[in-house]
Image (cartoon, helix red, strand yellow):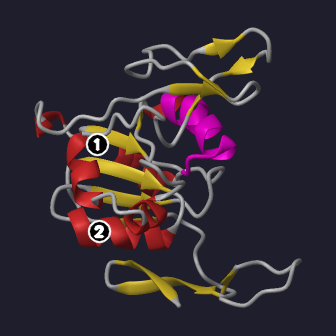
Amino acid sequence: MIPSFDGGRVIRLRIRRDEIGPKDDRYILVPGGSTRPMVLGNADAVVIVESELDALLINQAAGDIVSIIALGNAQIRPDAKTDKRLRQADLILNALDSDAAGAKEAWGFWLDNYGAKRWPCIRAKDPTEMQQVGVDVRQWIQAGLPEAGPKFQIQEMTVCLHQRRCEHLCSIPPERPFCAIAGEAIFDMDRCPKGMWK
């Protein structure tokens, strides 16, 4: 069971089921609960994730240096209270899942409306998987903060989802890259095959 709080009051209870059928949902929202995003912490920098479990993990690893907002899924939009919190943030790291849906929203809604910096997980789809493959979650967060300095740097790359071919760019371009063949945006990938994680 995953509770979400607001001012010390439980506003939502979500249940994650381990055993499900092919047509069953993994998560069930208890009727009557709020559908607002989960917000943890009050730091000036904010990390956006999809899963509440990912938010809890980041809060445990780096809750003293960032706030975390869990949307529930990539297409959820901030409510008025969450929007106000985001507009007060000094920095927004967008860590939506490293898949087509997460990348599309990152390069679309979140970039257009909040100027959020895309911060994909390393060698994994989400923060929980990232921790499972041995990447330090706190170090990954620190690398995205302005005060990180040269010690913490991630070399990023982009990939065209249509062709699945690497562009091997050292950083995400300031403007959204575009694939003329596919007629769609080029999205980021969760890892660089050159292993450029420091």
Place of residue 144 in the rendered image (x, y in percent of width and height, measured from the top left):
26, 40
Q: Residues within 10 Å of mark 1 (few under 14, many from 20)?
A: few
Which quadrant is home to the C terminus?
Answer: top left
- In the picture provided, is 181 more to the left or to the right than 52? right
- Between 98 and 117, the one lying in front of the other is 98
Which mark's residue is nearer the viewer, 2 or 1? Answer: 2
Q: Could you tell me which residue is drawn at 79 percent across and 15 percent down? A: 183
Q: Main secondary structure of the magenta part?
A: helix
Residue 8 versus residue 87 in the image, above or below: below
In the picture of the structure, the residue carrying the numbered disc 2 is 59
Q: Could you tell me which residue is drawn at 50 percent across and 57 percent down? A: 126
Q: Which image quarter: residue 28?
A: bottom right
Amino acid residing under circle 2: Asn
Q: Residues within 10 Å of mark 2 (few under 14, many from 20)?
A: many
- Between 8 and 126, the one lying in front of the other is 126
- In the picture provided, is 67 more to the left or to the right than 9? left
Place of residue 127 in the rendered image (x, y in percent of width and height, measured from the top left):
43, 60
Place of residue 69 in the rendered image (x, y in percent of width and height, measured from the top left):
41, 59
Place of residue 169 in the rendered image (x, y in percent of width and height, measured from the top left):
45, 18
Q: Is residue 46 visible?
A: yes
> Disc 1 on helix, strand or loop?
loop
Q: Is residue 85 visible?
A: no
Q: CA distance from mark 2 to mark 1?
A: 19 Å
Question: Which region is colored magenta?
Answer: 97-111
Marks 2 and 1 close (CB-CB < 8 Å) = no
Amino acid residing under circle 1: Gln
In the picture of the structure, the residue carrying the numbered disc 1 is 88
Residue 100 versus residue 35 in the image, above or below: above
